[in-house]
Amino acid sequence: MMRAGKLDKTITIDRFTSTVDEYGTVIEDWTTVATVRAQIIQASTEEFMRSFGVSSETAVVFRIRNIDGLTTADRVTYGGRQHDIKEVKELGRREGLDLRCVAQGA
């Protein structure tokens, strides 16, 4: 069971959308899907070997209550920084989700 007291951070979940304005111009932007309470399970800086050398990424796992339809195409905003969702893992029977993310521009 997920304890409300552990959900001590606020995150925003955004989804990339395309709309057409009254002039027929396509406008692409991030739209807020939900603002939810979350627990940070893990935050670390991992080094990855790349073809251009070594770089580091900040990996964070956010635990939230269940929200239907979240995918890796969505992103999380926390502390003024955007995080790409790399994996959405369901906990129990629709009890909650672990969102495994990597900070953009890390």
Image (cartoon, rainbow, N blue to C red):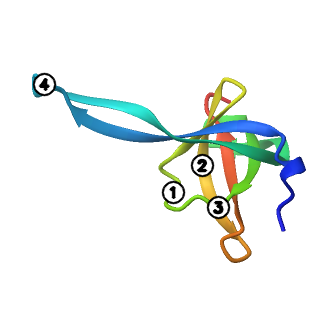
Q: Nearer the viewer, residue 59 or 2?
A: 2
Name the residue beneath numbered marker 2.
85
The residues tagged by marks 3 and 2 sit, at their Cα atoms, a distance apart of 15 Å
- Looking at the rendered structure, the secondary structure element under dot 4 is loop
Of discs 1 and 3, which sits in the foreground?
Answer: 3
Are discs 1 and 4 less than 8 Å apart at CB? no
- Looking at the rendered structure, the secondary structure element under dot 1 is loop
The residues tagged by marks 3 and 4 sit, at their Cα atoms, a distance apart of 36 Å
Query: Which label number is shown at residue 71?
Result: 1
Q: Residue at x 68, y 30 (%)?
A: 106
Q: Quadrant of residue 35?
A: top right
Name the residue beneath numbered marker 3.
66
Q: Residue at x 44, y 35 (%)?
A: 31
Dot 4: few (<14), some (14–19), or many (≥20) neighbours within 10 Å? few
Looking at the picture, how far across and down is residue 97, in whole percent? 69, 61
In which quadrant of the rendered image does the N terminus lie?
Answer: bottom right
Q: Residue at x 51, y 47 (%)?
A: 74
Mark found first going from the N terminus, 1 or 3: 3
Mark found first going from the N terminus, 1 or 2: 1
The residues tagged by marks 1 and 2 sit, at their Cα atoms, a distance apart of 8 Å
- Looking at the rendered structure, the secondary structure element under dot 2 is strand
Dot 1: few (<14), some (14–19), or many (≥20) neighbours within 10 Å? some
Instruction: Please indicate whether residue 79 sits to the left or right of residue 31 in the image.
Output: right
Looking at the picture, how far across and down is residue 91, in whole percent? 73, 69
Mark found first going from the N terminus, 4 or 2: 4
Looking at the picture, how far across and down is residue 55, in whole percent? 71, 35
Q: Is residue 29 above or below residue 67?
A: above
Name the residue beneath numbered marker 4.
22
> Can you name the residue that lies furthest to the left here?
23
Instruction: Please indicate whether residue 12 sits to the left or right of residue 42 in the image.
Output: left
Of discs 1 and 4, which sits in the foreground?
Answer: 4
Which amino acid lies under the numbered mark 3 shown in the image of this protein? Answer: Asn
